[in-house]
Image (tube, helix red, strand yellow):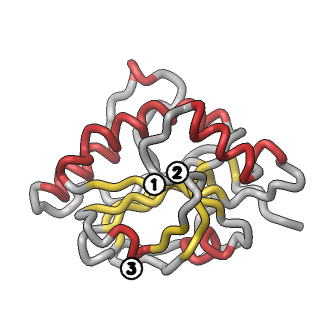
Amino acid sequence: MSDNILQIGAKIPQFNLSATDGKRYGVDSFVQAKVLIVLFSCNHCPYVQAYEERIIAIQKDYANVGVQVIAINSNDAVDFPDDSFDNMKVRAQQRNFNFPYLRDESQDTAKAFGASHTPELFAFDTERNLVYYGKIDDNWKEEDKVKHRYLRNALDEIIAGKPVSVPETFAIGCTIKWKK
């Protein structure tokens, strides 16, 4: 587990991970993206499940302006078999994920980012500097009661060439399930 979470302005940590689509991805796989969103995710967390449709919609709504979402599952699959790579493949297909879903078996990627929760996201600009960190919006349970769309607001500001007015929010959700 890591206490050194990335700070705003930090460079993206490098990774090279297998995805549910049978490919491997690293930072260089997304050079065309103007904004790269790295979402620490999993299968079993009710917070993640509540946000899946919103993440799919964000990828769909912002793909044409160069935004790319990737989800990374770093959870221990021994104690949490729902989060195994095989079950990730099933979930990605069932939910029709329109973004890569990567497996961080060693948990080194989560540690490099300082990630601690699911869902927890990191948005990087074209130079791959961290420009937004935290949560998607302010109501994980009831989408129709959301008042602050933190991630969408940050994306709109980045695309408009403006600084992100709320660069950090507190990510809530399940903790990443670290290996013993």
Quadrant of the drawing holding the N terminus = bottom right
Measured in 3D between alpha carbons, the distance from the residue under mark 2 to the one under mark 1, in whole angstroms, is 5 Å
The amino acid type of the residue labelled 1 equals Gly
Closer-to-camera residue (145/56): 56
Q: Quadrant of residue 46?
A: top right
- Secondary structure found at label 1: strand
Residue 138: x and y in percent read 43, 36
Residue at position x 32%, y 38% in the image: 149
Q: Identity of the amino acid at label 3?
A: Ala
Please tell me whether residue 143 is drawn above or below residue 20 in the rendered image.
above
Q: Are marks 3 and 1 in contact (CB under 8 Å)?
A: no
Q: Which mark is residue 118?
A: none
Q: Are marks 2 and 3 in contact (CB under 8 Å)?
A: no
- Label 3 neighbourhood size at 10 Å, few (<14), some (14-19), many (20+)? some
Instruction: Name the residue tied to disc 3.
Output: 10
Residue 92 in percent (x, y) is at 58, 41
Q: Residue at x 83, y 65 (%)?
A: 179
Residue situated in front as seen by the camera: 101 or 37: 101
Amino acid identity at mark 2: Ala
Q: Which residue is mark 2?
A: 171
Mark closer to the chain start, 3 or 1: 3
- The reply to whether the C-beta atoms of the residues labelled 2 and 1 are less than 8 Å apart is yes
Badge 2 or badge 3: first in the primary sequence = 3
In terms of depth relative to the viewer, which is nearer, 75 or 47? Answer: 75
Instruction: Determine the image quadrant of residue 114.
Output: bottom right
Residue at horizontal 25 percent and vertical 51 percent from the top: 155
The residue closer to the viewer here, 68 or 86, is 86
